[in-house]
Amino acid sequence: LKCAPSFGSIVIDLTHTTANPPLRRARMDSLTERRKATVLAFFEAYSTGKWEEATRQHLAHGCIWEVFPRTVGSRRTKEEHTQYLAEVLKDFSDFKITPFEVVCEGTTVQAICRSEATHRLVGAYGQDYAFTFRFADDSGDSIVFIREFVDSLYSARIFGKIDKLQKGEAQNSAKPSSKL
């Protein structure tokens, strides 16, 4: 998975104190890198059709997946979100989500991403996202909360259009055939 470079950042090392010797800093750095690697692996799995496996592996029991903003949002358990994705993703091909900036602070990893896919009814699909992942304390691979911030205008337009086309398909398939 390729990740474009970030726009730079300033790092202030506050970990080397009497209470936080270098060993603790190294452990935190290692945990930070594991959390970022987990998020990158998560997106890679979603981009290669292995989203169910990644969801089972990385989302803790009781994990909540929240979609923002509230105008198009939802709040689902891990199980509810898995069912939702199974229904939504079946109509997409070549779905990819690429992070281009990933930052970790404590138990939180934030990722700015862009998706690309083809939907069977509307064609080209793609939008920008901001994700927040919260990890369990002292864990580099157990995600307890996800907030997915989407482009609300794009989401409302595209999923409204998809819903309308799906309803049209359902009506057409319910009509009796006029062919003899």
Image (cartoon, rainbow, N blue to C red):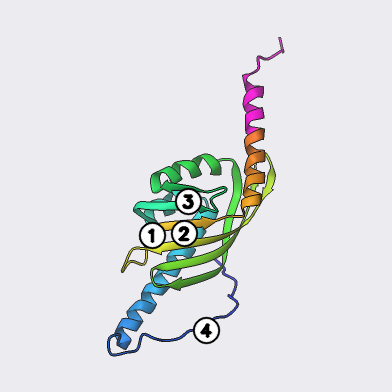
Check disc 2 and report the residue beneath it: 42
Spot occupied by residue 30 in the image (x, y as percentages of width and height)? 37, 76
- Asked if the stretch drawn in magenta spans residue 105, the answer is no
Give the vertical position of 36 relative to 86 (above or below). Answer: below
Q: Quick check: marks 2 and 1 in contact, CB under 8 Å?
A: yes
> Residue furthest toward the right?
179
Q: Quadrant of the C terminus?
A: top right
Whether residue 137 is visible? yes
Check disc 4 and report the residue beneath it: 10
Given the image, on which type of amino acid does mark 1 rest?
Ile
Q: Earlier in the sequence, mark 1 or mark 3?
A: 3
Q: Earlier in the sequence, mark 3 or mark 2?
A: 2
Given the image, on which type of amino acid does mark 2 rest?
Phe
Mark 4 element type: loop
- Mark 1, mark 4: which one is toward the viewer? 4
Say whether residue 118 is left or right of residue 97: right
- Asked if the stretch drawn in magenta spans residue 179, the answer is yes
